[in-house]
Amino acid sequence: MSDLHLTIDGQAVTVPSGTTVFDAARLQGIAIPTLCHQQNETPAGVCRLCVVEAGGRVLSASCVRPAEEGMTVATNSDKVRNVRRTLLELLMADHPSPCARQNQSGDCELETLARQEGLSGSRFAKRLSPRGQDDSSLAIAVDHEACILCDRCVRGCGEIRNNFVLGRRGKGFNAGIAFDLNKPMGNSACVSCGECVVSCPTGALTNKFVVQTELGGEPAEVEDLLKLPYFQKVSGTFLELNRNAVVKRHFRAGEIICREGEYGSTAFYLLEGTAQVYLSTPIAHVHTEGGAHGFFQRLGSRLLGRKQDRREGEVNRRTIPIDAPVDLPYDNPVAELGPGDLFGEMTCMSLYPRSATVRAATACTMYEMLRNVLDIMQRNKNIKGRLDENYRRRALEDHLKNVPLFASLTPEFIDSLRDRVELVRFGKGDVICRQGDLADSFYLIRIGFVKVSEDHPQGELVLNYLGRGGYFGEIGLLGMGAGGGGRRTATCSALDHVEVVRIGAEDFQRMVDSFPEIRGSLEQVAAKHLEQNRQRLKQSTDVPLDRFLAQGLMEAQSLLVLDLEKCTRCDACVRACADAHDGVTRLIREGLRFDNYLVATSCRQCRDPLCMVGCPVGSIRRRQSLEVIIEDWCIGCGLCAKNCPYGNITLHPFEVTIDNLDAPGKRAVVTKQKATSCDLCTEHAEPSCVYACPHDAAHRVDPNQFFRDVISG
Amino acid sequence: MVGTSLVFLAAAIVYAVYALPTPGGPRGGTVIGLAFGIAGYALMLFEGLLGARKKVPVWRLGRAQTWMRGHLWLGLLTLPLILFHAGFAFRGALTTVLMALLAIVVVSGIVGAVLQHYLPRAITTRVPMETIYEEIPHVRAQLREEAEQLVGTLAVEAEHDDKVRFHETYAQSIRPFLESPETAPSPLFPSLRRAIPVAFHQALEDLENICEEERQLNRQRRLYHWLHAWLLVHVPLSIALLVLGGIHAVMALRY
């Protein structure tokens, strides 16, 4: 390779052929200001701040202009300085000064250059339409307002990290950086490696800090974390900036790590030792019955298990799903966690209550982490691969077998599936499959909640909410939908952070062909669901939809209605309900109005049963008759009560004797809660609320019949 | 109603037969007078049991509606029976007080029944945004906060003077009403709309809705007071009547 000889600012310079003017000047110790160029990235020449006079008709961007033999370059002439100053003014006109980076560390490159040029403002008008911010990522803040379109982040993401998530969108005035196909950063394939933040010269991409959070452990050393397989390839810069977001904690044998029902925001990674995970709440439901018979009967409530009081529609469950890599056996809800296990993901990602109590069985060391760290771990390809492998190896078989329909799968068949299933993650709001699309997979939910809905001209009809252990996609694959043809009959979308096991159409077909009993059961259940959906739609078209649907009354089995023209608002119904249920009312005299009737707040088995979303142990479900039932393994966390928009679920406290969590080996009387909803006072011929109304205003009615009569006058 | 009328008729005939030939007029101490007194007082005791019945709503002692009907119709009978017992004469201080109390209790009961018959309908039609009575202060506080937030964060492109005028209008005409709807005049939105530029009309419409809800809650509060305030007279005087009636019975029978 031959050498070139050129002159830069009057100095003779010799450089190898192929060197750019920018590099030639740098080698000579002459600094040319630039924003878009970094030594470790391919030059792009988009900011034009590095322009120099190189003898041509126009100024050249030195970062992309190759040096030539005999070239004379001026990097700091009046003309160059004027152009550079104008460019800075133009860039500063759109720049929110001080930007986030300037505020964080005072080193926004654009603002530094502007200050060096003595610019305090810009002659040019600011852009009128804002470009906005993107706060969807847990680790990185995006401020499009501060972006100067230098593409350093795009090249960092693609050339340095080979992630190719960042790119450009729009043209001209509307140009900007984009993640994937212009998705919010948090929903994109971004793995939060932090390269874009390091590359960005301004405050357009900055790290989010978690400085206020005190987890109460010993801050984890970044070097130690990076040695762990799960943290390899996580951005060290990110971990450094978020030192408090992951801490190392030591637990003595017997010490409680987290308690069921408590709200938390962290996940745990078990480094050393073993832990016991179990439910301390009794496996039982609230049963209300008469304490003494006869005239002066008084109702009382007590806890009864499935063996003493089997309720209609109860199935023989073998396991209880929890927020850990294992499920708990129904009859003895205790399991063990070992080194390498990650638990509390749902609590951490979606802020659900803890689903189980975890106690250190031996001395344990754990990493406790906040959501942004877990999010980064889950996005990291390396970690994702390990988690997938872990799941395939340890949990897939349990997961499949815990679904009663798949209980008959043979170990050989599950082994054959092991390397073929895919663990797929979805963010809140993501559509997993859309009504009308070709059915290509069957899904089994591992984490999170999925909404199943149908689109109708009247609007969206929510068919169900599915939680851990739920499955969907079989109707399309079995060709049972309207018109057959293997199309999706409903849209399934993620309500929160969702992880599903995707079984491809080919494997699904192999499964139903090899196990005809599974095909039979699946077809039976699918046919039942289709029939229920048809009924639901029929009900919704039998009466004027606008009012009926809008008030969520369509699916109700039994409504408590108050005739407002007779009701004196004396609350005798509420007091009677409370009296009938140990002082805990399941009824509130408030709700939606329909004509001159008030549909009182009492469980109505909604078409969109939001109460089912988020239950950390999946203990609330519909019966086949559509009534909401709270299963025996409810841990009393109260999330369903909080989620019910009508306040129709209440928590009933009970004193029970259980193992003392703080003193192993001893028993203690503690107050535990169980969620309850209206039981229609089934012990009596008439619900107490109706019986106690002195003004003939309270009635329990079949909503379809009742409102049809009301509407027809 | 039929039963009450028949009992009343029968009692009136017995009274007429017994009172007319009695020299000096009928008295409570006679056998018939005493019988009227006992029947009247027994009915009063039954009336009082409604309150006790409400305390144990789950006991299967008959539907609350049946008890209420009995309370209303048998309560009406009490007054004529006691008048027959007294022979329409108030002889002593205690009996005069008792008779006055009975009259007030019966009349307040009738007033209450009438109010409870008509006012629920009035609340239903005139307060579509009705809420639970105990929650009214909370809802009102929320409405005030909503209005303040609406005005405080209003992003409308308009002249500075117009913005100032809008804020002044809110401070002078709307905020006082939201703070004390009982005393402050209700804002006249049609005229406010004429005085304020079109750019602010959407915000004004939102404020109008807030004021309308405030107005309805105020109306609900007023109607609710009417619906239940009579009980403040009816219940304590009923208790006083029962106690004094008992004292009267003991004294009359003993002395």
Image (cartoon, helix red, strand yellow):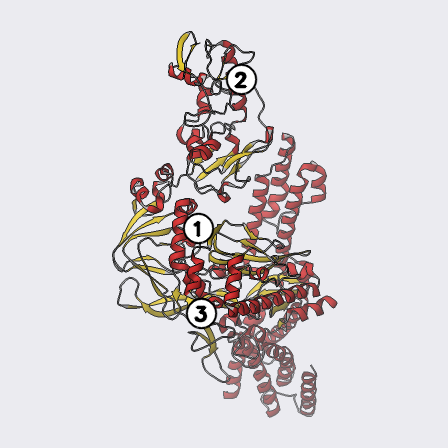
Mark 1 and mark 3 lie on one chain; the one further toward the N terminus is 3
Q: Which residue is mark 3?
A: A317
From the viewer's side, name the closer residue of B161 and A59.
A59
Residue A427: x %, y % from top left: 50, 49
Residue A149: x %, y % from top left: 52, 28
Residue A165: x %, y % from top left: 49, 38
Q: Which residue is mark 1?
A: A349
Q: Which residue is mark 2?
A: A86
Distance from the alpha carbon under mark 1 to that under mark 3 = 27 Å
Say which quarter of the image contains residue A625.
Answer: bottom right
Residue positioned 71% across, 62% down in the render: A544
Question: SS class of the residue under badge 2?
Answer: helix
Q: Is residue A61 above or below residue A601?
A: above
Tell me the kind of residue under disc 1: Met
Q: Would you call the spot at circle 1 few (<14 residues within 10 Å), some (14-19), or many (20 or more)? A: many
Considering every residue shown, the one lying at the far front of the view is A1
Q: Chain of mark 3?
A: A
Tell me whether circle 1 and circle 3 mark residues in contact (CB < 8 Å).
Answer: no
Q: Are marks 2 and 3 on the same chain?
A: yes
Can residue A214 be seen here? The reply is no
Q: Is residue B171 above or below residue A662?
A: above
From the viewer's side, name the closer residue of B214 and A276.
A276
Question: SS class of the residue under badge 1?
Answer: helix
Tell me the kind of residue under disc 2: Thr
Mark 2 and mark 1 lie on one chain; the one further toward the N terminus is 2
